[in-house]
Image (cartoon, grey):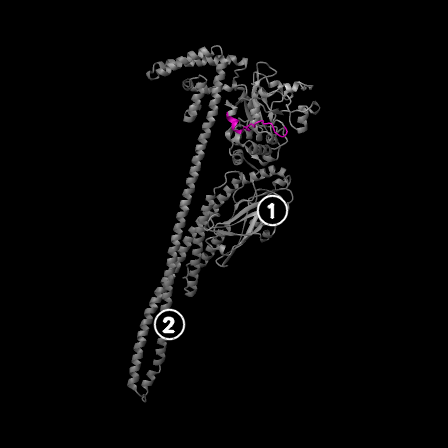
Amino acid sequence: MSRWATLSGNAAVYAKLQEFYSQRNFPIEVRYFLCTWFEDKQWNLFDPDNPEHEPHAIQLFSNLLALMRTKIQELSVIPDFQAIKMCLEQTLVDFKDTYENDQCGFLRVIQQCMDKEEELVKICQEAILAGYMDQSSQSGAEHRERVNAHIVQQLQQFSSDKSDLDDRVRKMQNLQESFIIQYTENMKINSQINSLHAQMQPMPQQLASPNCPNREKLHQTLKELQARQKNFEEDKKRLETNLSELGKEILKSRLELAESYNKLITEVQGLQKRVLDDELISWKRRQQLGGNGNLPKSEELDSLQRWCESLAEIIWCIRQQIKRMGILRAQLPIDVPHGIADLLPELNDTITGMLSSLVTSTFIVEQQPPQVLKKESRFSAKVRLLVGGKLNIQMCPPQVKATIISESQAKNMLRSDMLAKQTTSGTILNNVGTMDWQDDRNPLLPSGCLSIHFRNMQLKAIKRSDKKGTEAVTEEKFCILFQSDFNVGGNDLVFQVWTLSLPVVVTVHGNQECNAMATVLWDNAFADPGRTPFVVPESVPWPKLGEQLHSKFQQMTGKGLTQDSLDYLASKVFNAPCSLDFSQHVVSWTQFNKETLQGRNFTFWEWFYAVLKLTKEHLKGPWNDGSIIGFISKTNAQECLNRCENGTFLLRFSDSECGGITIAWIAESVNKQGEREVWNLAPYIAKDFSVRGLADRIHDLKNLTFLYPEINKDDAFQKYYTAPQESDVNSKNGYIATHLVQVIGSGQLMSADNISNPPRSPQMIPPSPACGPASNQTTLTDTMDDMNMDLTEYLVTDYTAGDYDIIDANQFVTGPYILPTYQTN
């Protein structure tokens, strides 16, 4: 896409472009119709102030006029473009009148227009990128909504299936109870039959005896007993038929239920794996990246808790149903037919394992301890169980213990080494506490949350391991181990749970913070999920590192880095020109924070961190306003300023001073009359801004008039100026208040050509009217030395011109006095 297409595609940017062209009496129609000609030229190669480039300016001006004449002829045959043709004709005349004898001025105007276009193109690109990011963010939000809806739908389905299975278990229980009742009745009938058989057994022998008394009565009794036996046997046969059918139905129901539970458990297991291995691990990864910026939203963890609680409820209910099925089987044993697998024992083991995995995996560190942990310092952390409420663990609140362990000890923990839980690498005070349950009745705390907030832990001692080669102490990683025991179901199950914090680097001095932060940033950015603690790659692609630097800068200052800034940082890392494509470059940990930059005594990270800290503490406002370019080389800064008016300045971070920012501005050359030169102030560091802020220093320097490219400095920095205080005379001592003002040290730059109303040099400031006798006077230089201040800052009296109207000078000239003396260069 051409530059013109990019600019014209953004209405707000195009309006700014029109205004800019109009201010320079350069009709934008010329730019439109000669689009290709303007964009094909490398305008930055020409210097309108260089006499050697004047022939190029003449040739370019002549070419433009020729192209305009050609375009006018083309439009003359198109009726709809007559108005534009007349505009171009008038512009042709105006250009001849204005630039016929000043082709270099013509070249300067075009360069200004092209520079403005480049600036606006960047705005367009950032707007497009922001649109993509918003779209990506919206897509991410939409994706999370779809994921949430799908998971909720599955959980609802599982809950419904669980309820259906529970109904089926109840029906099976009813069948089993019916079987037992009929079986008991059948046993009674068998008993009756046996009793009748015992009664009838001697009767045939008695009837066969010739001496049988009451033969007829005995015969009648036998018939009655035989009839009763027959009825009992018919009932027995009927019951046995029913029992056979019930037994088969019960067995079938058991097998079908086991198969249904197996299917449901498999599906629940798949969802649990998705929630724990995908969603929860993804949240932990976002939490780790949050250490470099872009913290995950708290709503994400709340959603995870709702999913995990629903899973816990479903799994617990299924486990109870399976246990009930086991009890029913024990009450009425029915052998599983040969060749058919008995799934019930396996299902019980599987569902118990799922519950164990759910409980142990959802014991998480909600609020991480500081990843740069200073010995003797106090720190906090928060641990949370995402399934506590549904399993009633809060009925017996568990205790949690926190200890600090080394990298090797963390590896042993992952190997299920039980001894590893007893080892530590230091001493932490206030490291044991009881988990609290917060429900709806406590509005100050999250609803339905089982957690513990360690608010006042203190690292008292640390035991370091042996160094690995050239590894520094700030590269050694530890972590905080949190462990506890959870009782579930009234001591039915006891789970030993533990979780590890993100890696922490322990320091003992403040000067170790910078290198410790480098270790933390690299680990947070490039740790793989499920890694062996705490392995990270030695080298990573530059774009990934640049993304993390952008996030860190945005987190600390409120505004991230542009692509130009990232290209400049890459040029420092690889010692290469900014114009190179760094997308395929790979940067190592050694390049990042082991090797010093070429010609410097500090590493890339030490330089970047110092800039980050300076911006956060002293320059956040102007940085967020876009008033500080910052990440630009000295050469590129000079090229930008050479195309601007005298007094134009920009702010860039110093290459040579770690944590310094300098002001570069364009002004007349002192040594070469008629030529211009880019000047650079000595870099300011943090302690300079603790004396006088950046905005006030810029306000003091009258040499500086426009912030690059052409923004009035007061428009950019006025809101950061320190409000002037009235110079009232103190009634007690009669002294007039003073304030610090900055000037450029050399008077060479104070010519009337490049400044207006220049302040007097420090040596020419008159003494205060409140000065004492000559014997008590000191020179300004001595005073500065006593105050340990730079000569570029001095004291000046607050007064207004009207004050002289009320001063009676006669009182000072009536008697003997000593004229003040001034030091001059």
Residue 530 on the magenta span = no
Q: Position of residue 120 (x, y in %)?
A: 46, 25
Q: Position of residue 580 (x, y in %)?
A: 53, 27
Q: Nearer the viewer, residue 704 or 676?
A: 704
Residue 725 on the magenta span = yes
| Magenta region, main secondary structure | loop
Q: Nearer the viewer, residue 39 or 260?
A: 39
Name the quadrant of the N terminus.
top left
Label 2: few (<14), some (14–19) or many (≥20) C-alpha neighbours in 10 Å: some
For the question of whether residue 176 can be seen, the reply is: yes
Q: Which residues are magenta?
A: 715-733
Q: Position of residue 313 (x, y in %)?
A: 44, 53
The residue lying furthest to the right in this view is: 775
Q: Position of residue 535 (x, y in %)?
A: 57, 42
Q: Helix, strand or loop at disc 1?
A: strand
Task: Residue at 45%, 28% (x, y): give it.
Answer: 124
Q: Which mark is residue 458?
A: 1
Q: Which mark is residue 821?
A: none
Q: Quadrant of residue 230?
A: bottom left
